[in-house]
Image (cartoon, coloured by chain):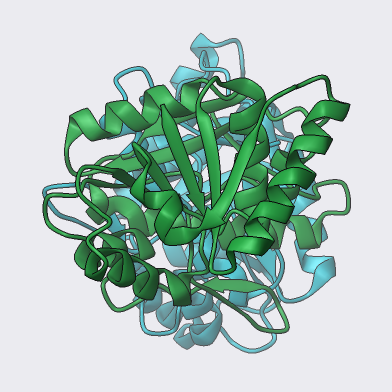
Chain colours: A cyan, B green
Amino acid sequence: MELAILGGTGDIGEGLAMRFASDTDHTITIGSRDAAKATERASTYEERLSEHGVETGINGTDNSSAAAGADVVILAIPPHHVGDTVEALTADDVLSDQLLISPAVGMQGDGDGLHYRPPSTGSVTEFVAERAPESVPVAGAFHNLAADRLADLEATLDVDTLVVADDPTISERVVALTADLAGVRPIPAGPLSNATEVESLTPLLINIARYNEDMHDVGVSFT
Amino acid sequence: MELAILGGTGDIGEGLAMRFASDTDHTITIGSRDAAKATERASTYEERLSEHGVETGINGTDNSSAAAGADVVILAIPPHHVGDTVEALTADDVLSDQLLISPAVGMQGDGDGLHYRPPSTGSVTEFVAERAPESVPVAGAFHNLAADRLADLEATLDVDTLVVADDPTISERVVALTADLAGVRPIPAGPLSNATEVESLTPLLINIARYNEDMHDVGVSFT
């Protein structure tokens, strides 16, 4: 399967690229607004994977080219840019039957911690769905995975991530994709209208990490 | 220590009463708007504890009398009544140096799931703090514990609960109180302004239970 990770040079994009490259046989392409940067970072990821005994190629290109050839597109893009990115892909006629997965969360910090600040649509995941062509399926997942922990292939995960999608067969596809990652258990949490409750977990995790010295890069497990 | 659980005849009140009675030596008083109902339910709880080999007394009385004699007051009251209850306790001059703990969460359901609907203050926990006299310390805790699982003394917990309080010494008191419950790990999550992110977890847990057959009464563990 062809997996594109747009924003693949950012923290969460890097983490997901490293894990999908390490744990699956999918062809991974990272996209960036700057194709040269994506190519350069892809080489860095390959080197780090090789240091961990994983010999695999990662492609790097611009976001639009990455999405064009993909079966699944992960939008690892900051929440305030993801709408423009999806609109640009739509305008360029890049999107047809790719499955879009949104991991972004809108947050704002104050002196006490991070707080959930979704777009007026209710969640970034729904915001993406609104901007994508109607025929393109959209799911939310990977919101609550700590980027640094993913990127560190020595780190044990043993964490859950929540999956939201309006179509149960889409949810099942994302669950199957995610279940291939070692130590990540995908859990369905209903349709896109439940994405708000899913996304809200991310600032909570960051606040927990801040107030507990031994809980850096904390994840969640539902038990 | 004297522990009052207002709304102690409700689901979460019952669960907390059963666990605190089972796992600690605190004197437990459950309060209700209806004192007779509280007395009757307290007897039922005592019988069920006795069936599990725990011989202990639980008092039942009206909310105001329960709070008056307590060191710690847990407000296990529905979110739309908790403000009135705290205002009534304040008007009756019942509150002086009790520590108030708020476990309530404002939620609203639609066809897809439950959604977080806090009061305009930002969270029920902050709403309680606004209504309590300034000298009375307020913390948030126990939001994300499943009532039925608490009430079933055969059920294993092994779950976390989050604690918010503006004063770190108050947070420490709640952490110490909670740590006595077998299988419940208290985790500080910062000041009251972080209560929104803590409370948001409750509708997520209920949505997860709804969309996963084997996750009834699910709890959370931060790992």
Question: Along the horizontal axis of the image, is A66 left or right of A42?
Answer: right
Which x, y percent locates residue B10? 65, 60
A149 relative position to B36: left or right: left
Asked if residue A61 lies left or right of residue A66, the reply is left
Q: How many marks?
A: 0
Q: Quadrant of residue A52?
A: top right
Judge whether residue B67 can be spotted in this image. yes
Residue drawn at the location 67% of the way across and 69% of the way down = A98
Question: x, y percentage for residue A147?
Answer: 42, 37
Q: Nearer the viewer, residue B166 or B204?
A: B166
Which residue is drawn at the image coordinates 79% and 46% (left, top)?
B44
One can see residue A32 in this view: no
Residue B34 lies, with reference to residue A37, above or below; the image says below
- Nearer-the-camera pick, B158 or A81: B158
Examine the rendered structure and indicate whether residue A194 appears above or below residue B129. below
Residue at the (28%, 71%) spot, across then down: B87
Is residue B218 rendered to the left or right of residue B185? right
**Relative to B209, residue B222 above or below:** above
Write the residue at 24% across / 65% down: B90
Q: Quadrant of the N terminus of chain B?
A: top left
Question: x%, y% of residue A88?
Answer: 41, 80
Q: Nearer the viewer, residue A166 or A178?
A: A166
Of residues A6 and A114, the one nearer the viewer is A114
- Residue A157 at x, y percent in the picture: 58, 25
